[in-house]
Amino acid sequence: MKRELFDIPEGVIYLDGNSLGAPPKHVAERMQEVVKHQWGTRLIRSWSEGWWEAPQRIGDRIGRLIGAAEGQVVVGDSTSVNVFKALTGAVKGTSRTEIVCDESTFPTDGYIAQSVASLTGLKIRAAHPSSMELTEDTAVVLLNHVDYRTGALNDMKELTEQAHSVGAQVVWDLCHSAGVLPIELDALNVDFAIGCTYKFLNGGPGSPAFIYVPKHRQSTFENPLSGWNGHREPFAMEPSYEPDPGIVRARVGTPDILSMLALDAALDVWDDVDLAELRERGLKLTALFREHVEKLTSLEVITPEVRGNQISVRCPDAKAVMDELIARGVIGDHRPPDVLRFGFAPLYVTDEDAIKAAETLAEITR
């Protein structure tokens, strides 16, 4: 527990870390230094004093949390843009004919997959992770590690092996699992992964996303967005594009330094976190909340036992119920038409928070 390190208003039970993580207290002070000194005093000199390399350096910090060795993760752009990079890179030059997309995927992943299919002439097929029916026609599979609506956790090892068994590649979306549980991208031979940083990683609203490209794929990965930041020698200002040989080729344009360095500051809280202990804590919190919801209400919990750090509850008038919860200081969210979502960030959510949230939900729905 590191609750004392976070800015959470008194009287608020914050269970929406799966949409926007709470800010670590020191981030505001760090950003004052960035604005007043790095930007205000050093001015353009700061680009050569750490700004330019920030996407790779911060990428390595995230890499530690997702089982990636150094030089395989870079931070920048949005989740949507990184999905586009990964999917397009995966199907470049393929003779296969289909992209398979998790049918319950977060909408942006599905929209981007449709765009990639349209641009490349491939077909797109939606399938549930439990019955994908992959064939030698499958070029790439796009999967969510944790389902954004139900909180269900997909088996990364099994599904990656399933894709590889027919010669397909796999792109994993880690938006709802990074900062929740141990992930072993290198060990599981994952082809590509992407994720956001503003949820359980607490990077701040709109903080830059990340993309993972393993070393053995970097030399053949063709970033479809050949921006100057991914060039082998960006300041040579050459008219033709030659990609950097490493993870830098996944960069595109000039990074948003203020958001980038806010994320960098937020990641300090993770430096000494044991991910196995974090996972155990998250499972206990979600189990405690589930137990009390099922004991105190007649609502249906739709989150399976194999889960991330989220509990979803089916509830009539979900929006109105969530509005009342928020009015009483219990902040979660809802997804139409009838799902209440509660995201438990183990770094700052307490057992008392979980129990009080369930009791408040019971009072409202009686």
Image (cartoon, rainbow, N blue to C red):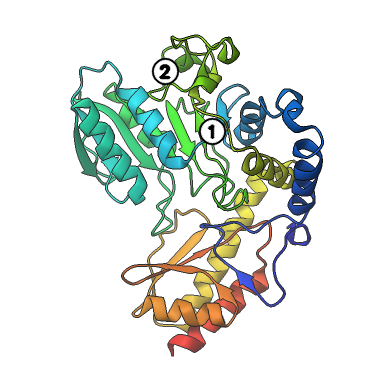
Residue 275 image position (x, y, % from top left): 64, 44
| Residue marked by disc 2 | 221
Q: How crowded is mark 2: few (under 14 residues within 10 Å), some or many (20 or more)?
A: many
User: Would you say residue 134 is visible in this rendering?
Assistant: no
Query: Mark 2 or mark 1: which comes first in sequence?
Result: 1
Mark 2: secondary structure: loop
Q: Which residue is drawn at 40% across and 45% down?
A: 154
Q: Which of marks 2 and 1 is in front?
A: 2
Nearest the eye: 53 or 310: 53
Relative to 218, is 294 above or below? Answer: below
In the rendered structure, the answer to whether residue 343 lies left or right of residue 302 reads: right
User: Would you say residue 81 is visible in this rendering?
Assistant: yes
Mark 1: secondary structure: loop
Which of the 4 image quarters holds residue 157?
top left
Residue 101 image position (x, y, % from top left): 28, 40
Nearest the eye: 206 or 211: 206
Separation of disc 2 and disc 1 at Cα? Answer: 21 Å
In the picture, the disc for residue 184 is 1
Residue 9 image position (x, y, % from top left): 70, 71
Q: Which amino acid does label 2 sit on?
A: Phe
Q: Which residue is drawn at 49% across and 76% down?
A: 293
Q: What residue type is labelled 1?
A: Glu
In the rendered structure, the answer to whether residue 130 lies left or right of residue 270 reads: left
Relative to 365, is 83 above or below? Answer: above
